[in-house]
Image: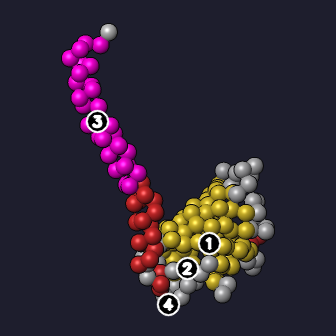
Amino acid sequence: MVEPALSKWIVENAEKIAASIAMTVATFLVGRFWQGVIRPWIQNFFWQSNKRLSSSYKGEFRQVDAKGEFTKDHTDKVLSDQIELKQNASRVWGTMSVPEGRATSYNFEATMNDGVLRGTFASADPQKESIGSFLLVRKSGSKELKGWCIEPIEGNVIAYEYKWVPKS
């Protein structure tokens, strides 16, 4: 049985307790809305247009061995992929379609800071375990990006010279 004094206290303070819980929930929801919707929208609105990337690129890459030399299999062969991306301020994400790759389609996430795009990718097909990362530098006054891509294959880390050329 509840003590009469405790019971009286609960009744007297029920409104205050309910108001405190409601304010806590409201504060949490406003904070989540600010971080998830309002702040990214403001950042994207004021993001400078010269920092924006094209929405589609043609990627070109050549495999390099541990010495930094192009491998015999890929000396003259430039492989390509198609990149479709979306950008919200410094956040970049999208897909890379590689017709000649181990996986035909990859999802990627990246960030663009000070002209450097750094990101990771993984196979869009869960049956094909293929992951990697890339680091691309934007050429001055251009939307073209050039750098490196690496991915583990059969216990080795394989490096590729990688370039993104805007389609439009």
Q: Is residue 43 above or below residue 36?
A: below
- Rounded to the nearest angstrom, the CA distance separating label 3 from label 1 is 51 Å
Left or right? Give the position of 164 relative to 71.
Answer: left
Task: Inspect the image, locate mark 2, and give the three-letter code of the amino acid beneath it.
Answer: Leu
Q: Which residue is mark 3?
A: 15
**Cβ–Cβ under 8 Å for marks 1 and 2:** yes
The numbered mark, 4 or 3, whose residue comes first in the sequence reads: 3
Q: Report if residue 60 lies within the magenta region.
A: no
- Rounded to the nearest angstrom, the CA distance separating label 4 from label 3 is 62 Å
Please tell me the numbered disc located at residue 53: 2
Q: Residues within 10 Å of mark 3 (few under 14, many from 20)?
A: few
Where residue 30 sits: x, y (%)? 38, 55
Which of the 4 image quadrants contains residue 95? bottom right
The numbered mark, 3 or 2, whose residue comes first in the sequence reads: 3
Query: Which residue of the protein is positioned furthest toward the right in this rendering?
Result: 99
Q: Residue at x 53, y 66 (%)?
A: 110
Task: Inspect the image, locate mark 4, and give the three-letter code of the amino acid beneath it.
Answer: Gly
* In front: label 3 or label 2: 3
Q: Which residue is mark 1?
A: 85
Task: Inspect the image, locate mark 3, and give the three-letter code of the amino acid beneath it.
Answer: Glu
* In front: label 4 or label 3: 3
Query: Which residue of the protein is positioned furthest toward the left in this rendering?
Result: 5
> Does the magenta stretch mainly form a helix, a strand or a loop?
helix
- Rounded to the nearest angstrom, the CA distance separating label 1 from label 2 is 9 Å
Please tell me the numbered disc located at residue 141: 4
